[in-house]
Structure formats: C-alpha cells, structure tokens
Image (cartoon, coloured by chain):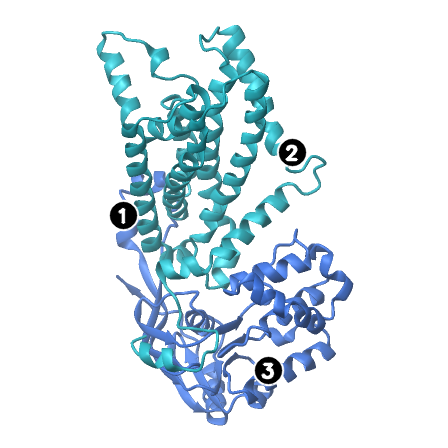
Chain colours: A blue, B cyan
Amino acid sequence: MRNGEIRIRDAGVSYRLYREKVSTLKEAVVNRFRHLRSAEIFWALRHVSLSIEPGEAIALVGHNGSGKSTLLKTIAGVLQPDEGEVVTQGRISPMIELGAGFDPELSGRDNVFLNGALLGFSRKQMEAKFDRIVAFAELGDFMDMPIKNYSSGMYARLGFAIAQDVEPDILIVDEVLAVGDERFQEKCKARIGDFRAAGVTFCYVSHSLEAAKELCPRAAVLHHGRLAFDGPIEPAWARYRELERGPAPGPQIETG
Amino acid sequence: MSELAETASAPARAPPARRTGLAELIHYRQLIALLVVRELKVRYKRSIFGLLWTMLNPLLLMVVYTVVFATIMKAPQRNFAIFLLSGLLPWLFFSISVLQGLNSILANQELIRKVRVPQAVFPLSVVGSNLVNFTLSLVPLVLLMAVLRQPFTPALLFLPVGILILTVFTSGVTLLFATFTVFFRDVRHLAEVALQMLMYLSPVFYDLQMLGQRDAWWFHAFRFLLKVNPLWYLLDLIRSPVYYGRLPSLQTTGIACAAALAALALGYFVFQRLSPRHIHYL
C-alpha cells in the first residue's frame, strides 16, 4: 500500500443494544446473564466498501445517525470493525474533535506535549514543532496558563495548531472548521488547502454543500449505516437530498 | 499490511505503518511518562508541601500505627516502626495502584472515544505515578532507619530488583482489574473489600515468626492461605533487606518472579483481548 491510502472492505461496526442496560454484576447474576443472549445488535455501519487513493479528497455526507462518525472513527482507528477490514497507510491527523485529550489543569505548554504524545510523537519531535505551534495558535503569553482559563476559541486554536503540525498522510476533519473567529477559520481553510496541495488524503464530514464542494470533488453518501452513493459531489448531494426527504425509517435492528 | 518491503523502500519519512500490540505500547512509552507527570502535577497542585506530602504521608501513618501496635498492643519486634513501614509502604503501592488503576479507563473515556491510543497506557501510568510516590516514600524510611540505628547492610542493594518485581506484578493485576471494571462497574467495590481482606493475609502487620506454631486445623488452613498469597513473597522482597538486613531467600525470590511474570502475562493478554470492546461499554 502507498502512504495516504485507505482501503475499506465490507466493513461493519455493531453495537449491542440491551433492552435493560446491565452494568452491574448483581443484575447480571440475577438475570443469569440473560442480557447477553437477548441483546439486539445494531449495525451502525455495514457492508461499506470504499477505496480512497493517496491525495484524494472525499466528503462523507449523510443525515444524523447515518454512520458518518462511526466510519470516520473506524478510519482513525478509534473503533475496530467487527466485520470486514479497514486498512490505512501512513500517519493520520484526526481532527475529529480539536483538543481531545487536553487536561484543563495543565498549562498550554504541557498540553502541547501531552497531545503530541497522544498522537505518537516523542518529546524531541514536539520540541522542534513547539514554536511553530505557538505561532500558529497565536497564543503567545497564554502558553503558561492552565487551559481551563482559555476561552473556547483559544482552546480550539491550540487544538488546531497541534493537529495541523503532525505532517499527516491522511487528514480527517469532522466539521471542526466551525470554531474560532472568521479570521482563524480562514487560516484553517488555507492550511487545509496547503495539505491538499501537498497530496495529503482528505476525509471531510460536512452538512454544507458549499463547504464540501470547495474542498472535495468526490462524496460518499451514507444512509442507515450503508453506502448509498459514491461518486462526484453534485449527484451525491442530489442523492443525499433525496434520501433526506424520504420517510425516515427507524434504525434497523437485527435480533441476534 | 502485507507489503512490508514496499514500506521499507519508501522514502525515509517518519510515519511508518500503524503499529499494534506490544510494539504500539512501546512506541507510546513517552506518553506513559507524560501521563505520570500530569498525574503528579495535578495531584500536588495548589498544595504548599507538594511532593513533600508523599514523604510526610507514610511518616504520619507510621506514627499512628506504631502507637497502636507497639505501645497499645505491645508488638514484640524491636524497631517496630521499621518492621511496619517495610511492609506497609510496598503494600500501599500495590493496593493504591490497583484501586486507582481500575478506574483509569473510565476516567479517560473522553479521550478513548476520540483518539486512537493503546489503552494500556492509562492503567500503566497510574502504576508509574504510584511507583514515583513509593520511591519517594522510601526517603523518610531511610531517615528513620538512621535515627533508630537500624543497620544498613549490603542487602539493601537488592531493593531496586525487589521493587521492579513488585512493579511488574502490580502492573499485571492493575491491567486485569482495569478492563474488568469497564464491563462490570462493581469490580471497584469488590476490589476494595478484597484488598482489605488481602491486607490481613499479607505480611504487613505481622510475619510468620509472629504467628508461632499451633496444632489446630484452622491454624493450618490460615497458614495455607498465607502461603498461596503471592504478596507473601513479593512483600518479603522489600522487608528482608530493609528490616532483617538480608537477601530474600532464593525460593521466595523465585516464587515472586514467577507470580509477577504470570500476573503481567495474564493481565496484558486479557487487557489486549478485551480493550477493543471497551468503547462500547464506556
């Protein structure tokens, strides 16, 4: 496989839905572990196959609960597929949630190193990046302050500043661009443009056609965990609109 | 990833193939170190004595226990304070690690939901921060030994080995409890009670010599329980050099090593096996 490649073959992610949630031993014993048998399996994602080439930009669209986030998390490696396989090659920068893993008690500086380590970087590597990150976040004097005192915009700026400096092969963005003030949003978009120009594979979740069209020529439409369409963005969006208008059937539950 | 050769011949750019299992955990060792630092920093924030508390704490505990056992209950050992601390400090290291560690997956669930990270780093970093505390608490112990004229013998050089073996054991048990707690929240309460009982079955407040000999079935049953408790051997790795001034016996060391490796192997494999499902139960 080449760096930046994503191969998804017949992937499925299931959740067990318990009629009564059993999370204590007593309940389990009283029910004689019946819950394990009566659990219903809900496939948040099933039979999804996608091939994304290095340098390609794809938008993932679908209504709430369609499985977009599940697919994104599976690509990011946060979730393991229960069926099929999801294989990626190269470093992934998951901008699923900016600043995930920040500790509010620690200073901005400490959080940069902690976040870097969470992404798999050594202290040395982060030291080399540190000044660039501070410059990008425009936080200067605030770096030694505990981040619980940051405004939410500052928080997101620091998060994006770290995520943009990880030299990714695959960039995953989950509508995080709706943070910070307009100027910072422009800066983030420009940075993503740089990545695109540098040939980074790009997965983008959006509810806005305008934003998606600007960045991605291709789109995959998810509907109730299935892949409903995969192709150029204009017809994909038409399909998404069509599905949205249709009667929304409840989530498909298979008893197992 | 089957095309390993292709990856190897690719330009020498940092990001390699996605690591899994032990290799991934080793790659993230610096994260464990940072989590340990975070834990210590947050714990001692806004406290005037800061890390000093770690050293003060066992001393204060010791004062209480020594008064109770040496004065009121008239314990026979000379330098009872040293006897007690040499068992109590490693015991506290073990039990606090397990109790804090079993919560660590739940405590970091926000992160686990959003970032791909080998989850074992969380329980292991709890063990790490408690290891720092344990090591620091040896400082007042050494001071006390000097004050009470407890002899310093070359056997003390064995301590790092003993601490290492105890840490391996503690890591294994903590991993095991951490993953179970995700599926059944009452493991926490169960563990609290179990650790209480285990403390009295471990050589913390007494040891075999103090028990003496009695010819009654219940006494033999009790002694049997003590002998199958791995902590009986593990805690002796610390007490022997500190209090008795001699190396632990070869048999004790062997059993302790075996117990430690078995606990780590079991804890690690169960944890790795179950951790992909954690996210569904958080």
Q: Is residue B25 above or below residue B39?
A: below
Q: Do callouts 1 and 2 mark residues in contact (Cβ within 8 Å)?
A: no
Quadrant location of the N terminus of chain A in the rendered image: bottom left
Q: Is residue A247 above or below residue B92?
A: below
Is residue B205 among the parts visible in the rendering? yes
Compared across the picture, whether B62 is left or right of B193 comes to: right
Q: Quadrant of residue B59?
A: top right
Where does residue B61 sit, x and y in percent of width and height?
56, 22
Which sits in the foreground, A160 or B136? B136
Q: Amino acid at mark 3?
A: Ile
Compared across the picture, whether B214 is left or right of B14 comes to: left
Q: CA distance from mark 3 to mark 2?
A: 48 Å
Quadrant location of the C terminus of chain A in the rendered image: bottom left
Which sits in the foreground, B97 or B207? B207
Q: Secondary structure at mark 3?
A: helix
Q: Amino acid at mark 1?
A: Arg
Is residue A16 among the parts visible in the rendering? no
Q: Do callouts 3 and 1 mark residues in contact (Cβ within 8 Å)?
A: no
Q: Which mark is residue A34?
A: 1
Q: Amino acid at mark 2?
A: Leu
Q: Quadrant of residue A81?
A: bottom left
Confirm whether circles 1 and 2 share one chain: no
Q: Which residue is mark 2?
A: B52
Q: Do callouts 3 and 2 mark residues in contact (Cβ within 8 Å)?
A: no
Q: Which mark is residue A192?
A: 3
Q: Nearer the viewer, mark 1 or mark 2?
A: 2
Where does residue A46 sit, x and y in percent of width and height?
33, 73
